[in-house]
Amino acid sequence: MLAHIQGVLSAEEVASIRSVLEGTDWVDGRVSAGPQGAAVKNNLQVPEDSPQGQALSQRVIDALMASRVFVAAAFPARIAPPMFNRYDVGMEYGSHVDGAIRTYPSPDAGVGMGARHYRTDLSATLFLTDPDDYDGGELIIETPYGVHAVKLPAGDLILYPSVSRHRVEPVTRGSRWASFMWMQSLIRSDSHRNTLFEMDVALQELDKKIGAKDQTLVTLTGLYHNLVRMWSEV
Ligand code: NI
């Protein structure tokens, strides 16, 4: 399932993050890619050891964890510090699959990163440039239900299973800036996680319609939590 999470960052937060990024160093994006990815990757990234990048990373984490929809969709167990990339005119990232296991050198950053190693269950891109400001640069995600071209307003995030083959189309005007990240989910199975997310949304709607005191709704909410107990790995 692809989940479009709206308004993770406000327009003011996007502008503030962008103004810091204007003054940071950018390096060849191949530093964080494996051999297959590096062969088709042509973009720029903020180095992982950049102090400005690390401070921005924490701001993105805080925004993610404050988004109820994000938490309900992702069930994040470990989120490595989000990184920042840009695609200027002519840059692209060809078709690839994200590596299954990543290692992060600092146990103090991100969410739950004490274990250093984490499995990439979910990948996410948080858009930092408005679609009107660049051409091309769509994130193309192949899923069992078809191919999706994703280009979201600045401040919005797309969450997708890391098993998906994906690419970023060449930018033909302007510059596409984004934050990108990987995470391990408490719910390993994509279908289990999707079921829980849909159930959560339905329970929220029922709550609005009939009120939280309704005993049938209390039962259904209990069943939701029982499924989380059955399916989660902590
Ligand atoms: Ni990727």
Image (cartoon, helix red, strand yellow):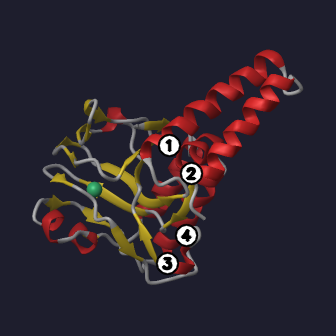
Which label belongs to residue 231?
2
Q: Quadrant of the N terminus?
A: top left
**Contact (CB < 8 A) between labels 2 and 3?**
no
Inspect the image, locate mark 1, and give the three-letter code of the amino acid beneath it. Answer: His
Q: Say how many tags the image has.
A: 4
In-front residue for pair 110/42: 110
Query: Does residue 6 appear in the picture of this structure?
Result: no
Q: Secondary structure at mark 2?
A: helix
Cβ–Cβ below 8 Å for labels 2 and 1?
Answer: yes
Which is more N-terminal, label 1 or label 3?
3
Q: Residue at x 35, y 73 (%)?
A: 25
Please provide percent x and percent y for residue 38: 16, 67
What is the C-alpha distance between the residues marked 1 and 4? 25 Å
Point out the frontmost of discs 3 and 4: 4
Q: Which residue is mark 1?
A: 192
Q: Which residue is mark 4?
A: 110
Where residue 51 is drawn, which disc sits there? 3
Secondary element under disc 4, as helix, strand or loop, is loop
> On the rendering, which quadrant does ligand 1 occupy?
bottom left
* Residue at screen point 53% across, 49% down: 74
Q: Position of residue 113 (x, y in %)?
A: 54, 74
* Label 2, label 3: how far apart the Cα atoms are: 38 Å
Eye-nearest disc, 4 or 2: 2
Which residue is rendered at x = 61% and y = 31% of the image? 199
Residues under labels 3 and 4: Cα distance?
A: 14 Å
Q: Are marks 3 and 4 in contact (CB under 8 Å)?
A: no
Measured from the top left, where is residue 124 in percent x and y?
Answer: 41, 51
Q: Earlier in the sequence, mark 2 or mark 3?
A: 3
Looking at numbered disc 4 in the image, what kind of residue is underneath it? Gly
Q: Give the quadrant of residue 114.
A: bottom right
